[in-house]
Structure formats: C-alpha cells, structure tokens
C-alpha cells in the first residue's frame, strides 16, 4: 500500500501540473496518444487474445482501432479547457475544470480497447488516470497504458499522468477506488457495486442483457444477418450484444430458417436446453457467469456444454419460453449463443422484452421493424427502459455508437441509468470527466415600462377619445359599473355610444371591494352577449371587476382558476401560474370617476373571495387596459368622502413605488409628479371640488401618474397591511393606507438604524430608503438640512394632509373593535407578510415587526422622529 500511496502522490502532482495546460497543448497530447494506440492495435489485440482466450483476435484489432480512431475523430475539436460559454448580458461564464485522478477499472472482456478509451478521455480532459487491470488481463492492459503514456509524455504530458497497478488485486482495486476523485468502472455487477460503495463519485455500467425484437414487418434477411454478425463480433463479449431474440409468431419459422441458412444451430430439445442452463453459471449462482463460456466460439460453447453441432456452426439459438429470474437462459450470456422467444403480438414482444430487461435493466434493446409504416410500434418500443434503443442495427456495434448511427457518441463504457443502478444512462464521453464552474456576475433583472397603448386626458376628453372606437371597428360594448355611478354618469357613456351607432349593455352590480361571485356573474353575462369592447367605468372596484370579467370572458372554455391566479409570486417573470392572454375577443377601456386606484392604467385587480373574505391583489400585464380616458369632468360632483381616501391611496402609490426595489428612473418621474399633484391640489379638490376644475384635474392626473409608476415598480408594505385590515375589519382601503403610510415610511427609513434586513432583489443594491424618502421630500419642496429631517418632514406632511381632508389617524377611530383586532392580529400579520405587495418593499419585514406596526396604527401611537 505504501507503493500505491506513492503512485497516487505522483499522479496528483501530474494532475496539478496538467490542469494548467492550454487547449492547444492538450490536443497535441491527445492526438499523439491516439496515434500510438492505433499504430499498436494489432499487437495489443494479439496480447489480449492470448492472455484472456476470449473473443476473436481480428475483432479485437477492430475494437482497438475503434477506441483510438473513432474516439479521437469524435472529440478532436471538442473544447475541454477554459470558458466554453459566456453571456455578457446575463453575466454568466461557464468554465471547464478537470476532476483530478480518474480511477479506471478495466474488464477482462475488453482489456485493451477499454484501457485505450479511458486513457484518451483522461488526457483530453486534463485528468490523471490510475488503471486497475483485471488480474486475468493485466499484461495486455498495462501494455496499452504504457504505449499511450509514452506517446503522451513525449508530446509534452507531465510525468506520471498515466499510472497502473502492476499486481492488481481486489484490495488494491478498492484502494484505487477510494483514493481517486472519480471512478470509471467497467466490469461485472459486483465490481460496479463496489465502485458505487467506495464513497467516491462513480460512473459505473450495469450488466447488459439486450433483447432484440423481430417484428413481422422487418427485413428478415438483414435482421438475421446483422444479429449473427453482432453476436459473433469478438464472440459476444460486448455488453450491448443481443442476448435474447423476441420473434413474432407470424415470422418465427421463416426467421429461424434464415438463421439456419447462416450457420446457426437451433437448440430445441429439453435435454440440450438443460445442458446450457447447467453450464451457464458458476456453482449455479445467477449472474456469476461461467468464464469458460464467455467470449468463446459457437463450436467451443457446444463442446463445453456437451452438445454436438455441425462444424460450420457460428451461432447458437436456444429456444425458450420462460422469462423469470429462475430461468438461466433469460440472463446475460456474453457469448455466441442466445435465447429465442416466440410471441403472438407486438404488445407481447414488448412485455417479454421488459421482463428480460429485469436482468439487465437500462442497458440496450433493439428493434427490427419497418418503423415508417409502424410508428405506433416504435412508440411502444420507446417505453422500454434502456439508455440505448437501437432500430434496425446490430446491437453490439450499434450500441457503442458512431458506427451504425453517427449521431450516437462512441464509447466503450455504456451507462444504464437508474434502472441499472447507474448514475448515468448515456455513452460515457469526455464531458463526464469535467467539472463545470459557473461564474455569475451580478446583473439586474431586465425592466420595462408597460402602459395602455392610449391614454386620453384633459377636461372633456371623453367624447374625443370615443372616436377611436370607429378605428377599432367596435360593434358591441359591455359596460361594467356600480348602480350609483350608472345613475350619475351612465348617460355620459351611452350617449357617446349612441352617436357612434354601437350597441351596448350595462352590468351595474359591482359592489365596493368586488366579490369573485360578481365577476363570475358578469363573465357569464359577457359570454352570452359577446362584446368586442368592455368598459370598466367608475371607481377602482368597477374597473378591477371589469378586468377579471375580461380575463374570464377571453378564455371561455379554458380553466381559469381564481386561486391559481391569486398565487403570490416573487418575480412576475417566473411565476408558477401563468395568466392566459387577453385581447383575442375584446379590448378593454377604463374610465375612472374617482381619483385614487389608478386601475385605469395598471395590470392590477383587487378581488375579494366570497368564502374567506380575503382580498387578493391580482397582477399580470394581461390585465392592462388598451385605453384609459382621464376626464376630470366626471369627478366634479364626487363627494368629499369619495375624494379624500382614494387620493390618499394614490399618494401611497407614489411613495411606495418611489422606494420600491423595482423602481427605475422611468417610474420615479411619474411617482414624483403624482405626489406633487396630490399634495398641492388635494385640499382644494376636497374643499371646493364641485367648482375647482384645475384641482380636480391635477388630482386625477396625479392618481393616474401614480398608477403608471406602480404598474411597473409595484407597491410595498403599506398595501400589504392595508389589504388585510380591509378584508378582516372592513376599513376603507384609502383610509387604511393613510393611517399606515406614516408608520411604514418610518419603518423603511429606519432599516439601517435598526439593523433591519434589506430586501433580496438583484436590482436593489444598497438599502437606500432613507435617501429615497428624503429625495422625495426635496422634490415636494419640504425643508430639512439632513436626510433624517427631510423624512420627518415627509411623515408630518402626510399626517397633516390626512387630517386636513377629514381622515382619521388610527383604526380605533374608525370603530374597529379592539378585541376582534387583537384576535386577528397574528393571522393578519402572517397574511400581510405573504401579500403580493410585500416583495417589492425595500425593508424585508419580520412578522413581529408587522404586528407592531398594526398595533401602532390601531392605537394611533405617535411616530418617533429621526431628528
């Protein structure tokens, strides 16, 4: 073992040096090694044949040639060094890195070809390799390793980059497996199991036991010739070789006759079958093959088994009908004889093949069939579990790849996947011996500004905007509103439609905080009426309801599950539930009659579940209206109690969007202008709204600016808490926002001062809530020498505006029952944390913090100043 320690010490140093080589250096070494192996293919084949007495000398020449030439040709241009993928926009680089030392276990069945293959893979990937030969084939395997090593060293490879065990043993093989960085194990099931049990990452290959289905549509002459060719290649020691034939009854006799014509002997008597059963395994242990039979000619097999066959026999077929584990003939053979099963249908052929594969799961199966005419049979064949499913190809040479299908990678190590208890199901290649390092530079998510395609504004714009309906060729309109708005302003809409000769119907059943049942009712009504334009007309409730009705109507016949739509997402681009598209049947037009929600320009809709009374903020750009008409004429008669709370909602939109983790320069401008309009003109609109056109227009524009900002920057914790207190205790949404906003401005701004958590979002690089609120205060003309003083001034300004327009500063003042509030506090806090709006808040909230904010807002506790 001291000697092995030294072998690995040298191999480790060689690897460390080789891992610094360039692709050009590696490719030079790879080519030199492949040439050397190819030049010595005959000598190595002779050594292997003489030492193992398995297979056919000439076929071993071909295998050595294949392992050198085909492997080199396939991978000579493959990049295995350095950065192989780079995307500057995404900030992603992927780099190949060698694994270290490859522990290579070599089988006695393919002792030189497999050694050549594994050495070339290691050299191509800048790995060192330590080879553990099979004791029964150590001389030829070591000679193959020496030839490749000498050529590689001469071409510039580090000393000791290829090493081997001179005197292999089970103990030494276990040492190799335990001390390597990865194992390439090719051998019997016991060896592969040992590799996986070693504690070292392993690529091992399971037993082969390939069934071959011969369909009644097959070219039987080609099929029989190919199967004989395949099984007699190196006397069947390739693990992908056919071990059982599954032949349809309708062509069974003809197929057998063709095999006979091609020097095959058919075993039909029970006595001869039993001789095969008895001879197949050592000591009767299934899976432990009798080495005397492995890789022997048909004549030698017959002699060992004890049957007489003609001197010209090249292939033996043993008829069988049992596919259970207890039937030796159903197992892998690695020789020049196979079992043959007669089946009545293709479906039975699949069933029989599946049963045979239980003794060789995941490896290989083949099909002889006219798949162009019988695509259904090909589909059934695909249902078998092997990693290689060969069609109209000899299984042994077809399975190793690049001979009968040039798209299959050439390999001498064929994975069987999880079905065969392997970690890999494909043909092993260089990429299996490489680690991939990913370099990920920080990148911001791509942003956008999505708004309705047309936004009309100014006093009296309604009638001009409706002219666009001619351009859209609108024929039928469905108006969604509430009873009061319909009575007050309904004719303003219908008169315009009458002038245009457009028919319409009115749904005026929307309630405050629209219920899911209401939207479903409207959607069903739409399906009957079949409009090509939907108008959401009134306050935020009417527009929100209209949007969801639109979505349901557009997707009639498709399942639109409200609870799925309401699933919270962390990133709108990655959400689990995708909204269906809109615009296939109808366009959406929103006309607000209040100044608050901004729903006319947003992709949001707040709907209340009838059963739970939970408010769900739905968000998706498929809900964005096609047109918005912002006409302050429609707000001139709005009463004070419908002016103040919606406007404070709009102000909250501005401030939350401005500090959102998703805010951009595009959204900030709208947020600032909206806040200016509302702070400067809301008192006038509230006190003298019926006469002050300018104030009404400015507040209405401010609410729309707010909508345009938060439609793309999203909102924050104020709305998260407001949604829940509104759902649990029926507090008017805008009034709840007015109460919560000062508390949450303080909470967010104090994030760094209080050791709070910064929200996780790639675009949000530093916690800047204090600075952002202070900048907003400057934009609004507030006074303060420091950021802290400016934030205090902003909080005070919001509080003063709330008081000036007749809104309260606490939930208690609105009559919310204290006991009920306390009882619901825990659940409200959890729901608020999970609200859709929370994710964009700049301070990542803790549920205990949310509970305290709720309590402060309930009792109207004073807000601690920064300055």
Image (cartoon, helix red, strand yellow):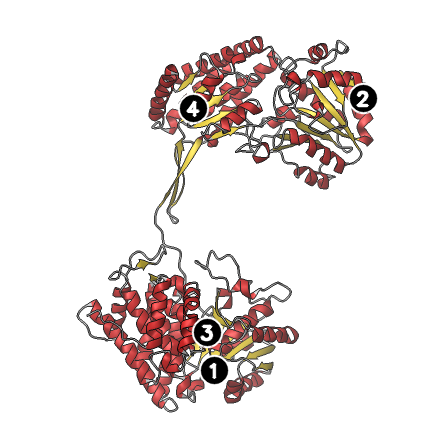
The label nearer to you, 3 versus 2, is 3
From the top left corner, tell me how far across and down residue 777 is, in percent: 25, 72
Q: Are marks 2 and 1 in contact (CB under 8 Å)?
A: no
**What is the secondary structure assignment of the residue under circle 1?**
helix
- From the viewer's perspective, tell me whether residue 35 is left or right of residue 395: left
**Numbered badge on residue 123:** 4
The label nearer to you, 2 versus 1, is 2
Q: Nearer the viewer, residue 453 or 810?
A: 810
Q: Residue at x 47, y 12 (%)?
A: 143
Residue 703 image-quadrant placement: bottom left
Mark before the other along the chain sequence, 2 or 4: 4
Question: Above or below — where is 640 with respect to 574?
Answer: below
- Crowding at label 2, few (<14), some or many (≥20) Cα neighbours within 10 Å? some
Mark before the other along the chain sequence, 2 or 1: 2
Q: CA distance from mark 3 to mark 2?
A: 84 Å
> Label 2: which residue?
257
**What is the secondary structure assignment of the residue under circle 3?**
helix
Q: CA distance from mark 1 to mark 4?
A: 76 Å
Mark before the other along the chain sequence, 3 or 1: 1
From the top left corner, tell me how far across and down residue 639 is, in percent: 42, 88
Residue 274 image-quadrant placement: top right
> Label 3: which residue?
728
The label nearer to you, 3 versus 1, is 3
Mark before the other along the chain sequence, 1 or 4: 4
Q: Residue at x 58, y 71 (%)?
A: 586
Q: Residue at x 46, y 60 (%)?
A: 569
> Label 1: which residue?
462
Mark before the other along the chain sequence, 4 or 3: 4
- Crowding at label 1, few (<14), some or many (≥20) Cα neighbours within 10 Å? many
The label nearer to you, 4 versus 3, is 3
The label nearer to you, 1 versus 4, is 4
**Numbered badge on residue 346:** none
């Amino acid at each position: 073992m001291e000697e092995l320690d030294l072998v690995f010490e040298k191999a480790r140093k060689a690897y460390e040096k080789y891992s610094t080589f360039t692709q050009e250096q590696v490719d030079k070494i790879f080519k030199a090694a492949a040439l050397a192996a190819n030049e010595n293919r005959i000598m190595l084949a002779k050594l292997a044949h003489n030492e193992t007495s398995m297979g056919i000398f000439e076929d071993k020449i071909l295998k050595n040639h294949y392992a050198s030439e085909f492997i080199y040709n396939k991978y000579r241009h493959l990049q295995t060094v350095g950065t192989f993928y780079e995307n500057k926009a995404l900030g992603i680089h992927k780099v190949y890195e060698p694994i270290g030392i490859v522990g290579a276990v070599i089988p006695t069945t393919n002792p030189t070809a497999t050694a050549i293959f594994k050495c070339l893979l290691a050299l191509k990937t800048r790995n060192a390799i330590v080879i553990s030969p099979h004791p029964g084939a150590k001389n030829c395997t070591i000679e193959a390793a020496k030839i490749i090593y000498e050529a590689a060293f001469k071409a510039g490879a580090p000393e000791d980059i290829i090493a081997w065990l001179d005197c292999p043993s089970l103990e030494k093989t276990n040492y190799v497996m335990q001390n390597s960085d990865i194992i390439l194990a090719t051998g019997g099931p016991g060896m592969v199991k040992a590799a996986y049990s070693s504690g070292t990452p392993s690529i091992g290959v399971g037993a082969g036991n390939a069934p071959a289905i011969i369909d009644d549509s097959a070219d039987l002459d080609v099929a029989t010739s190919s199967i004989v060719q395949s099984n007699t290649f190196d006397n069947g020691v390739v693990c992908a070789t056919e071990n059982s034939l599954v032949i349809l009854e309708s062509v069974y006799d003809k197929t057998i006759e063709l095999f006979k014509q091609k020097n095959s002997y058919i075993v039909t008597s029970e006595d001869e079958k039993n001789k095969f059963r008895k001879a197949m395994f050592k000591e009767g242990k299934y899976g432990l093959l009798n080495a005397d039979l492995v890789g022997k000619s048909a004549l030698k097999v017959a002699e060992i088994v004890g049957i007489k066959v003609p001197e010209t026999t090249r292939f033996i077929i043993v008829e069988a009908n049992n596919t259970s584990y207890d039937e030796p003939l159903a197992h892998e053979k690695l020789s020049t004889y196979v079992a043959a099963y007669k089946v009545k249908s293709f479906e039975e052929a699949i069933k029989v093949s599946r049963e045979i594969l239980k003794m060789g799961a995941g490896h290989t199966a083949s099909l002889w069939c006219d798949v162009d005419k019988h695509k259904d049979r090909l589909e059934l064949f695909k249902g078998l579990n092997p990693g290689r499913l060969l069609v109209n190809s000899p299984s042994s040479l077809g399975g190793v790849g690049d001979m009968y299908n040039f798209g299959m990678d050439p390999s001498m190590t064929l994975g069987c996947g999880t079905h065969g208890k392997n970690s890999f199901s494909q043909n092993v290649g260089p990429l299996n011996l490489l680690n991939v390092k990913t370099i990920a530079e920080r990148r911001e998510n791509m942003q956008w500004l999505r708004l309705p395609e047309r936004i009309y504004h100014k006093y009296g714009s309604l009638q001009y905007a409706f002219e666009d309906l001619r351009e859209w060729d609108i024929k039928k309109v469905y108006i969604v509103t509430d009873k009061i708005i319909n009575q007050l302003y309904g004719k303003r809409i219908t008169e315009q439609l009458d002038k245009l000769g457009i028919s319409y119907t009115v749904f005026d059943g929307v309630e405050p905080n629209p219920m899911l049942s209401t939207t479903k009712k409207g959607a069903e009504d739409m399906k009957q009426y079949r409009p090509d334009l939907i108008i959401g007309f009134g306050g935020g409730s009417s527009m929100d309801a209209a949007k969801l009705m639109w979505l349901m109507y557009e997707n009639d016949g498709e399942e639109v599950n409200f609870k799925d739509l309401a699933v919270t997402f962390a990133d709108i681009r990655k959400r689990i539930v995708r909204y269906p598209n809109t615009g296939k049947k109808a366009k959406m037009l929103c006309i607000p009659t209040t100044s608050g929600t901004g729903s006319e320009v947003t992709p949001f809709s707040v709907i209340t579940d009838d059963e739970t009374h939970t408010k769900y903020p739905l968000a998706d750009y498929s809900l964005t209206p096609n047109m918005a008409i912002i006409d302050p004429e429609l707000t001139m008669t709005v009463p004070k109690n419908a002016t103040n709370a919606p406007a404070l909602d709009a102000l909250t939109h501005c401030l939350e969007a401005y500090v959102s983790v998703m805010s951009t320069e595009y959204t900030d401008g709208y947020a600032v202008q909206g806040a200016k309009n509302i702070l400067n003109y809301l008192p006038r609109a509230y006190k003298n709204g019926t006469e002050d056109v300018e104030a009404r227009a400015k507040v209405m524009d401010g609410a729309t600016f707010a909508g345009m900002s938060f439609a793309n920057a999203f909102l924050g914790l104020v709305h998260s808490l407001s949604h829940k207190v509104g759902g649990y205790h029926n507090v008017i949404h805008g009034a709840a926002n007015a109460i919560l906003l000062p508390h949450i401005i303080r909470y967010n701004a104090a994030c760094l001062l209080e050791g709070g958590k910064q929200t996780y979002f790639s675009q949000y690089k530093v916690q800047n809530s204090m600075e952002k609120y202070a900048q907003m205060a400057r934009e609004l003309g507030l006074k303060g020498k420091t950021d802290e003083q400016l934030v205090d001034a902003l909080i005070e300004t919001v509080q003063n505006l709330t008081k000036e327009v007749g809104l309260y500063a606490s939930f208690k003042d609105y009559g919310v029952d204290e006991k009920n509030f306390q009882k619901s506090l825990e659940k409200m806090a959890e729901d608020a944390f999970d609200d859709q709006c929370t994710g964009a808040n700049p301070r990542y909230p803790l549920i205990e913090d949310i509970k305290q904010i709720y309590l402060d807002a309930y009792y109207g506790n004073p807000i601690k100043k920064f300055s």
